[in-house]
Image: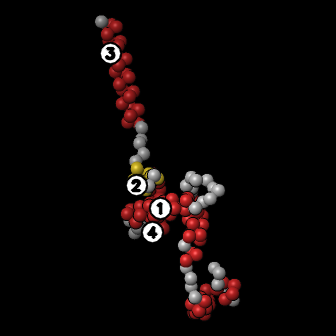
């Protein structure tokens, strides 16, 4: 009988340990899947909080859409990163750098603004250019 009580007590302790470890384990949730990439709940919450600090009216939907659009741009940019790491960058500045490089290579090549439009904008907004000449600011 003593042996049976000892076994029951051991099973009870094992069961309680399993329950407490299952309750203590905090599983990460997936908010969105974009191609083979995922957006985790913790990433979304962090991004949403940062966005709320600068714009109190921004919605969760807007932030999630921006995260998805950024991820789509990064996925496309990854295709054109010849000789570089195929992994997507994790920090914000690296993401911005990769997206900027992609836009410069793939999109800016198709944008043409006539010189007359540049000159008219310059003349109409001369105060914004801190006494620089048109030639100095036109590439920016």
Residue at 38% x, 23% y is: 14
Residue at 40% x, 55% y is: 32
How far apart in space, not on screen, are marks 1 and 4 (Cα)? 24 Å
Location of mark 1 (residue): 72
Q: Secondary structure at mark 1?
A: helix
Say above or below: 96 vs 17: below
The mark that comes first in sequence, 4 or 3, is 3
The mark that comes first in sequence, 2 or 1, is 2
Mark 2 and mark 4 residues within 8 Å of each other at the beta carbon? no
Q: Which mark is residue 1?
A: none
Residue at 37% x, 22% y is: 13
Percent x, y for residue 106? 56, 70
Q: Which mark is residue 55?
A: 4
Can the viewer see residue 45?
Answer: no
- Foreground of the two, 46 or 30: 30
User: Pointer 4: residues within 10 angstroms few (<14), some, or many (20+)?
Assistant: few
User: Pointer 3: residues within 10 angstroms few (<14), some, or many (20+)?
Assistant: few
Location of mark 2 (residue): 32
Q: Is residue 104 left or right of residue 53?
A: right
Q: Which mark is residue 8?
A: 3
How far apart in space, not on screen, are marks 1 and 3 (Cα)? 55 Å
The mark that comes first in sequence, 2 or 4, is 2
Mark 2 and mark 1 residues within 8 Å of each other at the beta carbon? no
User: Pointer 2: residues within 10 angstroms few (<14), some, or many (20+)?
Assistant: some
How far apart in space, not on screen, are marks 2 and 4 (Cα)? 23 Å
Percent x, y for residue 71? 48, 60
Of badges 1 and 4, nearer the viewer stands: 1
Looking at the image, the residue that sits furthest to the left is 1
């Amino acid at each position: 009988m003593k042996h049976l009580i000892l076994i029951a007590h051991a099973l009870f302790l094992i069961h309680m340990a399993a329950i407490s470890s299952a309750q203590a384990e905090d599983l990460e949730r997936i908010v969105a899947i974009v191609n083979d990439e995922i957006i985790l709940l913790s990433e979304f919450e962090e991004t949403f909080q940062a966005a709320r600090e600068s714009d109190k009216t921004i919605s969760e939907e807007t932030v999630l859409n921006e995260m998805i659009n950024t991820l789509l741009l990064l996925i496309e940019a990854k295709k054109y990163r010849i000789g570089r790491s195929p992994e997507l960058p994790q920090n914000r500045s690296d993401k911005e750098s990769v997206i900027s490089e992609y836009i410069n290579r793939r999109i800016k090549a198709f944008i043409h603004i006539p010189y007359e439009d540049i000159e008219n904008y310059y003349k109409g907004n001369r105060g914004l250019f801190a006494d620089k000449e048109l030639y100095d600011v036109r590439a920016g």
